[in-house]
Structures are given as structure tokens and as C-alpha cells.
Image (cartoon, coloured by chain):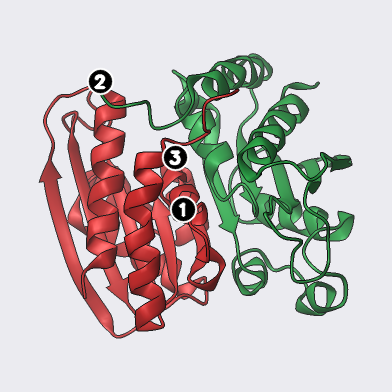
Chain colours: A red, B green
Amino acid sequence: MAAPCIDPELIAHAEHVVAALKQAGSTVVTAESCTAGLLAAVLSHVEGAGDVLHGSFVTYSKANKSAALGVDPELLRRAGSVNAEVVRQLARGALERSPADLAIAVSGVLGPKPDEDGNPVGLVYFCCCSRHGELRVERRDFGAQGDDVLRRAAILEALRLLAEP
Amino acid sequence: MAAPCIDPELIAHAEHVVAALKQAGSTVVTAESCTAGLLAAVLSHVEGAGDVLHGSFVTYSKANKSAALGVDPELLRRAGSVNAEVVRQLARGALERSPADLAIAVSGVLGPKPDEDGNPVGLVYFCCCSRHGELRVERRDFGAQGDDVLRRAAILEALRLLAEP
């Protein structure tokens, strides 16, 4: 029998988030750079996800951050992809382009090397934003661990932020 | 030690795709409904993915298919989400909103129940589209298997289509 496509432990963490969003009557869209769609996929595995998940904008390249979500190209040139202003623009851009009540954006460096702008492996920014305004921007430095360890850390942190009131 | 976030067998299949796209000088964006971002996430795990992957539009809800990718709401009302015309509009919408050369769209029913429009579990449509025109629309009926078996089948089929010339 094949292994599950996604580690069931990640799905278990997402169950609380889907339940909390459903309880609050909120819907969500994700804007993902380094996690590249895995956050939305994890949420989609939970039964009843269809009631709360609208989808995701995965903006893996800088060009797509601007094309798909309207991130200022000059900001990307000047400051790179991994900073507070970029995650803000990713989250706001996702809210503008979807019917969701909440957006969560994730942009960071999973490694194995620092990114092209010199941001260190393990640095990840998050922004959680609602139609009523910005809820939170968070900077986490998870340290120079393996890329899959960092991927998991980024997903779990994003789920934690989404489950907060 | 934690399990990998994504089954490494899926990543292994994606390695050929990233190599083929790199060889062809092509870049890709995905438009995902039932796979919900996992296809883009799988591609992103391959070393060098940054050279070929722009990202993804995950349109899990019908409302987001229209809001994020411009799928005709009347078509969705009349014909549901799982048909040739919807995957065409998803793929074209993704190409219009990203800098990618190629788009692959996936929409289907992973179960455990038929979708709200009565489409059976295991039915999945794919569309591969380039800036020069439509390359292929494919309808696959994988049968009423478990959702994770179907998820894997959909991802592998999408990767196969992307690796074709």
C-alpha cells in the first residue's frame, strides 16, 4: 500500500483550524511562496474543508508575485521576497482576488541555500489579514535546518496563526 | 524523526517533469481544484524547480474559480466544476494571470462522496495549455477508490501530461 500523499500529522493539525474557521463562519485563501501550495492542500484534506477553503495563490517566482497578486516589482527588486511588506502585499492581493474573509501569506527560505537576495535559510514571514484589516505580521527564524523540517515548521506556524481568534 | 511532508515517490515523478521543462526552456503554472495545491508543492520540492515553476492558482470553491481565474459562473451553475470547458477556462485563466508558458488545470472528484452536481467519485478532467493554444484536454475515470489513491492518480497523470512534448 502506498504511503499517504501528505503526512497525516499535518492534516491532524489542520482539523482544528477548519473547525475553528467553521465555528467562526469564516472562509480562507492562502498566498504561498516557499510552501508552494502545501498549506492549501493540507487544509483541503480535512473533512468539511469545502465550507471554509476558497483556495490559494501560489506565487513561487518573483514575477508571479507581481503578475498574480500585484506585489510591487520595485519592492521585490529592492528588498527581495522575504520581508514584512511582501507578505502584506501577498495577503492583501489574495483577499482582493478571492471571495475569502481571511488570507494568510507565507514567504521564506527553506533552503538548502540562502535565497538570491541573501536571506538566510530558515527565515519565514507570515501575514494574516482579514477584510477588516491586518491581523498580524510575524517574522520567524527557524534556523538552518533541513528543508523538509522548515517546510513543516512553516505549515504548522501558518495553521497556528489561522486558528487564533 | 518526522515523516516527510510529501511522499517522496511523488517528488521522484516530478523530477523528470522539471528536467523536461528545463530542457525545453518552458515555465509552468498550475490551476488546481481537487488537488488543491499539491501538484505545485510536489513540483517545488524538486531541486531547480525555481527555474520552471511560477506557481499555482488553487480554486477549490466554485466562487473562487470565477473570482481568481474568471471561469464563467453561469457555466459552473449549469454544468458544475468537473468538465472539459471548466478545465479549459481554468488553464487559460491561469496563463492570462501569470508569466508562465504552460498551464495545467485539474478538476475532479476525489470523494468520498460524489460532488454537489452529481459527478462520480474518481472522475477527473485535465487541460494542458500553452500560449500558442490548447495542447490537450483529458477525461479520466479512475473509479471509486479512496481519496488519497485518487489524489495520487490525479497528481501522477498531471505530471505525465506536463512531461509530454
Q: Amino acid at mark 1?
A: Ala
Earlier residue among tags 3 and 2: 3
Earlier residue among tags 1 and 3: 1
Q: Chain of mark 2?
A: A
The quarter of the image holding the C terminus of chain B is top right
Q: Is residue A64 above or below residue A51?
A: above
Q: Is residue B156 above or below residue A27?
A: above
Quarter location, residue B20? top right
Mark 2 surroundings: few (<14), some (14-19) or many (≥20) residues within 10 A:
some
Front of the two marks 2 and 1: 1
Answer left or right for A1 relative to B44.
Answer: right
Q: Amino acid at mark 2?
A: Lys
Residue name at image x 17 percent, y 62 percent: A137
In this view of the protein, which residue sits in the foreground, B25 or A94?
A94
Could you tell me which secondary element the residue under label 3 belongs to? loop
Answer left or right for A6 relative to B139.
Answer: left
**Do the numbered discs 2 and 1 sit on residues whose CB atoms are within 8 Å?**
no
> Residue B55, position in %: x, y?
52, 43
- Residues at marks 3 and 2, common chain? yes
| Residue tagged 3 | A61
Q: Chain of mark 1?
A: A
Residue A40 is tagged as: 1
Q: Is residue A116 above or below residue B85?
A: above
Could you tell me which secondary element the residue under label 1 belongs to? helix
